[in-house]
Image (cartoon, helix red, strand yellow):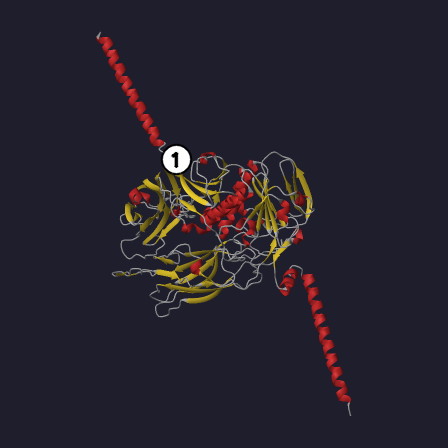
Amino acid sequence: MKSAISIKYWLVVSALICAQLLACGRMAIAAEISPGAFKNTITFEQLGKAQDLALQGIHTSEQIDFSLQRDRIATGAALNLIYTPSPSLVPSLSQVRVFLNDELMAVLPITQDQLGKQVKQRIPLDARRIINFNRVRLDFIGHYAMVCEDPANSALWLNISRESSIDLDQQALALKNDLSYFPEPFFDSGTRTTLELPFVFAGTPSTEEQRAAAILASYFGGKAGWRGARFPVEFNTLPRHHAIVFATNDKRPDFLRNYPKVQGPVVDMISQPDNPYAKLLLVLGRNDADLVQAATALALGSPLFRGNSVSINSVQVLEPRVPYDAPNWVHTDRPTPFSTLIDYPEQLQTSGLRPHPIELTLNLPPDLFIWRSPGIPMELKYHNTPPSTVDESRLNISVNSKFIASFPLAHASQRTIVDKLHIPLQSGQPYNADENVSMAALRPGMNNTIRFDFAYASTIASAQRDRCQTSLPPDIRAAIDDTSTLDFSGYRHYIALPNLQTFTNSGFPYSRMADLSETVIVMPAKAGPAQIGTMLDVMGNIGARTGYPGFGVTITSDWDTASKRDADLLVIGSMPADLRNRPDVNLILDAAHSQLSQARSHNTVPDLLATNTSSEPNTAATTRIGVASTAPIAAIVGMQSPFHEQRSIVGLLASTPEDYTLLRTALGDSGKRAAISGSVALVRDSGVYSQQVGPVYYVGSLPWWALIWYRLYTHPILMAAASGIAVFLIAFLLWCAMRRIVRRRLPEHNKP
């Protein structure tokens, strides 16, 4: 009897233990997959530190900025610091201090066994101190001697690896539906990662629905900027994260079936039905025209939005855009002040024993005609703490890592803050494969970085046998005045095409008009998610280059209509039959057959940096190859429009979803994008193959005398012949004039 009771007792205890373990397991799983929880690790390299951080001097610091999305809070954080201290440091005096938002988090003493070796430390950070924008500051206090130290001695250094990282545990917040925070939460300016924002349609969208989506893609691309943007397209599917949904009264996704009908253009923000942390931005209308109006209002007038829903009464463009007025491009009709080039208020200031360089980024139109230009005038105004004595302290200026000029920093009795100089431009000589093109500073069509380094000379403390004299370094501060200017006015626009780098790097020629009012996109008749996603990615890329939404773009699937417009054409999918039948077509690409024309020399891709290149000597097609294959392949092709000589056609050619994936990956990858150039770029799994083949054409205008001189520059024999003919004509005209004068004077001389 006791035995039976004992067995029952242990069975009950075992069951209770199993139930408890099962409950604990379920709780652990629930905690692991807690909705709205995120774990993220960001390296210093991902935070913009492309190189290791070198802290030098007796007391110097470096700061790393990171941000937290507005719809999240931090529940935990840690700094994984990887550093190597100088072997010459004094361990008892040297240390590293870690601050989070100016609050001391930890002090890391440098010990004897760490000198000259890589050290890894994990420092907990107080998550309560983490806000939307955060700054980790690393203070290095180093000593190499007990007395008489030079504050800038080369033995004082600490190297921080760019592989150091910050761990963040985050919890999403169920935000209020309020459009006054737009573009958040769909885009957060504090993030440094590529924006990925799904666009949702009820089914295959019409061309006007696609246009509404294209306007918003260019808007979000402009906000994302250097981060890049991707826009996955879904039909009648509810995405897991924030998304944009386009719907009319008669054409809606199933999850909006019960949403009330609207009486005009409406923008509404709602939470997803099964996920309170994810938001849907609804772009609604009675018809497609309402969708376009709502998207345009959202891109241009969002500062007026508030509440969870906004009805659009009217959208009116009062003044049309003009060429080359993109907000992200420098002015070419007047001097450009530095105040228009800064990204944050304190960008033009620096301080410290070794002040950090001041950097400015500027973008130039790719067709800026800079051939044989003496350079860009720059009026530079700067302020700095004066050196106490006359020494070798200087302000060094470089452009795109190329040294430009150096000015001595005047001491207190000799203050000067204004200097005028010319920034040299990239040589615009016509391209010649046998000629070395000189490297230069500014590069049209690409991001350019101007760097100002305030380099103060070190004052070494004097040391004698029984006497040591030291001095504290001054509180060095320096600033570039934001009224300093660069003057690009007076330059004309003229460029040799096709050159696909102008398209991938600056969206040219479409970005010539910031609102894309002279752009027509030709889409397949029944475009699927792959084709529409590719088009939206391109629109986002162009918006990132211009900084302005392309609300003037036209989208059509009718080639006849597109060909009659005086506009630049962007073709998605496959080339129309009219272009395939042209004798100078350099590529035919479809699912069944591929055909490529090649030039005599494979090394004929002109350099974008040599603006206004001419590749005529070696780009005539000499062979044509046709193949059939099932492996993924895509292509980008550039050519002159057969309908208008000043217009261009760029084709993004692909057949299968795998092909479009290759194409979109190449356009979104900076390394692959840099390899796209010439007139044809093939995209395969192995990489990008580009070449220049086919005729060259010119877009823009020059005065007749500049045009003649420019065209004859690469033809010395013709130039000599033209010069000889010109000299002969001038001499003949002078001879005729002199004979006429003599004939007039002789009768008067012969009179009695």
Q: Position of residue 415 (x, y in %)?
A: 37, 68
Per the image, the residue denoted by label 1 is 275
In the displayed structure image, the side of residue 121 where residue 619 appears, left or right: right
Q: Position of residue 341 (x, y in %)?
A: 44, 57
Q: Residue at x 32, y 28 (%)?
A: 27
Answer few, some or many: residues within 10 Å of disc 1's Cα (few below 14, many 20 plus, some between 14 and 19): few
Asked if 705 appears above or below 434 in the picture, the reply is below
Q: Quadrant of the C terminus?
A: bottom right
In the displayed structure image, the side of residue 9 where residue 276 appears, left or right: right
Q: In the image as oriented, which residue stretches furthest toward the left?
A: 2
Callout 1 amino acid? Asn
Task: Judge by depth and name the residue closer to the eye, 316 or 340.
Answer: 316
Task: Judge by depth and name the residue closer to the eye, 543 or 702.
Answer: 543
Asked if 10 appears above or below 738 in the picture, the reply is above
- Whether residue 123 appears in this view of the structure is yes
Q: Position of residue 273 (x, y in %)?
A: 40, 35
Q: Residue at x 39, y 54 (%)?
A: 344
Task: Judge by depth and name the residue closer to the eye, 84 or 132.
Answer: 132
Q: Position of residue 555 (x, y in %)?
A: 56, 46
In the displayed structure image, the side of residue 488 where residue 343 appears, left or right: left
Q: In the image as oriented, which residue stretches furthest toward the top?
A: 1
- Whether residue 116 appears in this view of the structure is no
Q: Quadrant of the N terminus?
A: top left
- Total marks drawn? 1
- Label 1 residue SS: strand
Q: In the image as oriented, which residue stretches furthest toward the bottom?
A: 752
Q: In the image as oriented, which residue stretches furthest toward the front?
A: 263
